[in-house]
Image (spheres, coloured by chain):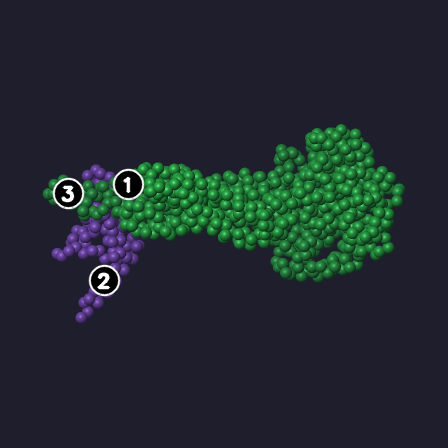
Chain colours: A green, B purple
Amino acid sequence: MAWAWRFWLRLQTLFRRDQIVHRLDDEIQFHLDQQISENIAAGMSLEEARYTAQRTFGNPTFLKEKTRDTWGWRWLENLYEDLRYGLRMLCKSPGFTATAVLSLALGIGANTASCSWMDALMLRWLPVRDPQNLVLLHIQSDFSFSYPIVRALAEQRDIFEGVAGFSGWVFNADSRGSIVAVQGTVATGGYYETLGLNPTVGRLLTEEDDQLGAPLVAVISYGYWERQFARDTGVVGHTFRLNGVPVEIVGVSPRGFEGSNVGSIADITMAVAAVPRVDPSSASLVGAGNFWLRVLARPKTGVPIAEAKARLASVWPAIAERTIPADWPADRRKAMADATFEFAAGGTGHTHLREVFWKPLVVLMAVVALVLLIACANVANLLLARATTRQREIAVRLAIGAGRGRILRQLLTESVLLSLIGAIFGIGLAWVSSRFLVAILSSGSMQVVFDLTPNWHVIGFTSTVAIGTGILFGLAPAFQATAAGPSSMLKENAGMSSFRSRLLSSLVSTQVALSLLLVIGAGLFVRTLQNLKNLDPGFKREGVLLVNLEGRRIGVPKDLLDALQSVPGVISASVSTHTPLNGSTWSEPAVPKGQVIPERDNAYFIGAGPGFFETLRTPLLSGREFTERDSANDPAVAVINEAYARRYFPNQNPVGQQLSAFVRGEREDLEIVGLVSNSKLAGLRAAPPPTVYVSYFQLTGNFPTTLDIRASGSLPQVAAAIQKELQPKLPDAPVEVRAFSEQVNAAMVQERMMATLASGFGALALMLACLGLYGLLDYTVARRTKEMGIRMALGARPGRLIRMVVRGAAQLVVLGIALGLPAAWAASQWVKSMLFGLTPADPATIAGSALLLAIAALLAAYVPARRAAKVDPMVALRWE
Amino acid sequence: MGKPSDLVQGTLDLLILKTVSLEPKHGWAIAKRIQQVSGEVLQVQQGSLYPALHRLEQKAWIKAKWKETETGRQAKFYSLTAAGRGQLEKEAANWSRLSEAINLVVETT
């Protein structure tokens, strides 16, 4: 009971403090009055009685303070006082506060934004049961497996509690009369069980749904349920049309779960076995030859990872025997059967964005850390300069008995307060800039969805950074301010210690060095992007529109092409299986007739219709394009590119020669009818691959299909006209007309992101460094007003004074550049792989950056220098 | 009578607990009582009583109540709690052991 009472008393002293303080006054007053009356009774005068009472009592203020100490919470009281005092000091110099807060907000905001990115992309657990136990299966760097393999793995109940194969998918769903493309997932039957999820309403998919011939059912996400069905529980049993096929909704997945592909939202989930019926063109995906499913597995409870791996290794050869396609070459079959599975941590789901953006994000983290350092140096600078003006205040406080520790704590409270205010603005800034980043990433066809709402990871990170920086930049100035004893400081005009001015200048030089690093980085990334943009990819992207027909098959397009030709503004129209840089490629083995066809694919293939090269403006070097006559009943023909010709027909004219190839597993002989120049197909950085174009209308089976259209005039208008023309002919799915240039830009998304961010941060760093230099010189000039006045009075010309100040600045800048250059050299080696068309030590970039920095710094120095020159000697000498 | 002795370190608590164990008293009365009973030998600096009183109150060994005195003024009266009684016994026992030991040393010749 005593402890409860004690706790109650502690609470009283915290929350009813004012009242208790008041009562203590009463108590002591009562004591004194009591003593006074006794003294009067003993015969003293009133005056004497009062004096004696106070003497026997002691110093009431001191004793009251000691009494308050016994109540605890002393630290809180001190903190409150320090904060109040700190806020008053910050409000007293709004210019200083605004500059410092702005610097910190930019630095901390940049860090928060990149941290929330890191968190969303890399660190966040999927909202599933025990995500830390999930593993992502892979064989070396290959994370894709075929449907039969996943099903066979799911049967291994003594290894895995559950195995889930899944892949992103797009469904064309009927929605209030129109057809909308909806992002989704196709998954094996064990998906929800493995993840350990429970339905919001209805049920989730089970193994029974993942059987050929099972009723077509789908699970929708909570978000989709909310948006499309207003959270109507009657949705269970409701039938909607996907790709024109009726599908029954059986349940809603739990709130917050948006699929296992980080960065995209899965609103509709169906079983893999249902795919052939919803999308007949993808029927082959359930076969053994397609490796397309990511596999998340949950090892059996109590089975250690090593044991699970060993068990899997022992059963794998038998599984491989059953599940690897029989028509694979023997050595490929053997390699697959001999492979060992590895387990990667799976609790954070999967995203290809991780591989693409891992390095850029790490670079980004380093960059924003540097920006923060520069901001800190700026604030430390400001604080140091201000400490001089506060010297007298601090000296007085030391003289009247404040401990050094107490004053240190006060100064640190102020700097942490400053950085916390900066952090609050920074979080706001991060919020805005994160959305900007998502916009850059989503510029391509790929929709990127991230929940960037600051969570506990991010808030924790930001406050740690804020408090850390507050202490970091506050410590040196605080020590400085309290180092000397009160007596020396109280003397008039003690001036600035040489240590302090050295510290100030070295901070500015460091800032210059760090910002040079960032400016050079920005230069390298901007030039990389430019090099990629100016590169000749082998086709002209401007003026080309694409319509991706995905699900709609070969055979249809001939009528569509005719219809397209009549749309106003269309110059030419063609059809192809792939377009350059569309994100997927097709490869086959092909060699000159007479040679042995290799087992490995050696050429990229594209099925192209008549007018394809004319539409993309890919130069035809000799021979002819595909024409209307190259259709199914005509002799098989091919067009090859220069790279292929150089490798297989060196020093010959390939036109008229024959090729032997396997096209979709069938052996074919093709006559080469044309030679075209090289095109970049899979990426702008890679050398153009050897490519064989085959006639689209001679292909059999299912192929992806894209309509390629060259248009003149306003592209959006032509696109709208095309959409209007095609949509009635293709009722099953939305017709989307996109610009080819967007697709090409999407191939540069990483470079664009780096260039944008690096130049943004480079500019920021430059600005902060200039601000730091300006602040230092402004302060120096103000301090030396008297000296300047004397110089002027003795006949120095204004120009001379300007030169004097600027020379001082130039020394700092040159020192900074000298420090920054080797650092920049070292850092740029590290991003070498991200550059294109230039070396890390690109002389033009480095020289340009150093020059830019020098000019900006001298501009920043010029303003205070002008002020020095305008000093009126009379005013200066009368100062003080 | 010589100069009033300073209190032996740590004995103020014991004196306060003992003084309020008989009946509730306010601060001034506690000071007076200690002085009187000790025959003016123990001179507590009156003000230093208050930090001690508040510390003991926070430890829940004594509790306080505002009541009217005979003269009609409000004063804070302290009294011993059950936990305080236990503490008093412990400290009193400690004290007698200590003083006996000191006596033994001082008086053995």
The residue carrying pointer 2 sits among few (fewer than 14), some (14 to 19) or many (20 or more) residues within 10 Å by Cα, namely few
Instruction: Report the residue that reaches farthest toward the front.
Output: A795
Left or right: residue A596 versus residue A859 is right
The answer to whether A138 is drawn above or below residue A182 in the figure is below
Q: CA distance from mark 1 to mark 2?
A: 38 Å
Mark nearest the camera among 1 and 3 is: 3
Left or right: residue B100 versus residue A580 is left
The residue shown at (38%, 50%) is: A500
Q: Chain of mark 1?
A: A
From the top left corner, tell me how far across and down residue A763 is, in percent.
53, 42
Q: Label 3 sits on what residue type?
A: Ala
The residue carrying pointer 1 sits among few (fewer than 14), some (14 to 19) or many (20 or more) residues within 10 Å by Cα, namely some
Return the mark for residue B99: 2
The residue shown at (49%, 53%) is: A819
Q: Label 2 sits on what residue type?
A: Ser
The answer to whether A816 is drawn above or below residue A317 in the figure is above
From the top left corner, tell me how far across and down residue A814 is, in percent.
48, 49
Q: CA distance from mark 1 to mark 3?
A: 24 Å
Q: Label 1 sits on what residue type?
A: Arg
Pick the front one: B19 or A619: A619
